[in-house]
Structures are given as structure tokens and as C-alpha cells.
Image (cartoon, grey):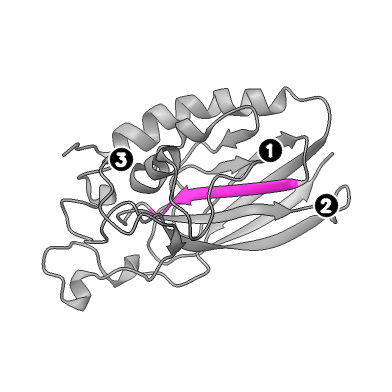
Amino acid sequence: MKKSNILSALLLGSIIGLSGCGGDMAASSSQGYAYEVQVTNVTAGQPMSPLLVSSTSFFSVGESASAALEKLAEGGDNSELLNADSVSGSKLITPSQSDAVSVNTLTQTLSIATMLVKTNDAFAGLDNQDLSSLALNASATFYLNAYDAGTEENSETNATVPGLGEEGYNSARESSDIVTLHAGIITKDDGLATSNLSSMEKFNNPVARVVVTRTK
């Protein structure tokens, strides 16, 4: 089983380095539309991985997660989803805190994803949101639900939750293998003796607030 320390090695290292690359590619477009996207973590105790904002769809409820989405949902690594149509944030988003990115697109749709770090494979997401009615300089507010990527069993144990310093991404598919709304987590406060998660890490939908402002 592959081990990783998501908080120090993955999220605060390689992803931050990649985020500049993704942002530069997105900003190179001189046509189309531009949006500022601000995401605020509204959970009590779940940190979130650096944002991924894209003008293309990358998940669908009821369908199997791609290998790239699996890496984001299990380990917070959005690098394989980054391309000319997407941009990455540069930091963990802790509870009550926000991060914002700017993205240039040729379409009027946006998709968003960020991992809930103290889970097995939960991510907050918005898929293919239509922004065609958003006027220049106007803003719209949306909310992100938590989804289960369906790629790893929700054991919530110390050995499988990356936010506890243990396993991150594992290529083996160990669960239903379809994306669904997340049912929530079980913690030591619920009697799971093998977990260091507490009631602070529990969550209900929605888990994040998004404000999108059209700037071009």
C-alpha cells in the first residue's frame, strides 16, 4: 500500500508548483470569457485540498470516476486534471477560509472539485455549471455538495485517511466504483476505535460556498 503525507509532501509541495502552470495556460486565452471563482470552506473541521476549476466536466454522479479524479478524491492531487481549460488553487482551504482563482474560458460553464482531506475519497464538487445568464461584472453564488468518488472503502481508519498522515492515493478500486452523494463519516466519537477523526470532522451538505464573478 502506497503511503504519503498529503499535508506536507503532496498538497503543500507538488500541487502548488503545478498550480502556476495550470493558471498560466488558462490565462493565455485572449478570447471568450473570464471568471473569478472564490470558494469558502463552510465545514466545522474538514480542510480542503487546492481547488480545481475547469471549463470542462470531469465527473458525473452515477458513473465511474476517472483515474485522474480518483487521485484528487483520494490524495488531493489535481495535477492530472490540469490542462489549458483549468486552473489550480495554491493552498489548503481550512474551515471558514477561502481561496480564489481566475480562469479564462471559451465556454460559459464551470466545474469545480476539491478533496475533503480527512476522508477516504470524499470531494466537494460542482459539475458543468451553466453561467450563460451571468452578465459582465455580475456575481452568482452556488454551493458545493460532498461526493463519494466510490474508489475506496470509507473505513475512516488511521491507516487509510490521508489527513491523518497515512495512505493517500491507491490505484486499487475498493468500493462501488461510482460517484454518489457522500453519506458522511464515522468517527471515534461514534465508537470507531480505529479512527482519530472526531465529531469536528463530520459534515453535512453543502460543504462549501462558491461566488463566481464574470470579469470578461
Q: Quadrant of the N terminus?
A: top left
Apparent side of residue 35 relative to residue 161 in the rendered image (left or right): right
Is residue 179 or residue 103 the one in the foreground?
A: 179
Name the magenta segment's main secondary structure: strand
**Label number found at residue 102:** 1
Kindly identify which residue carries mark 3: 6
Against 139, residue 50 (above or below) is above
Q: Which residue is mark 2?
A: 132
Horizontal side of 87 relative to 156 (left or right) equals right
**SS class of the residue under badge 1?**
strand
| Dot 2 and dot 3 residues touching (CB under 8 Å) | no
Q: Nearer the viewer, residue 112 or 16?
A: 112
Assess disc 3: are there few (<14), some (14-19) or many (≥20) residues with their C-alpha within 10 Å of its C-alpha.
many
Closest to the observer, 141 or 77: 77
Query: In the figure, residue 77 lies in which quadrant?
Result: top left
Which quadrant of the view contains residue 3? Answer: top left
- The residue range painted magenta reads 109-116
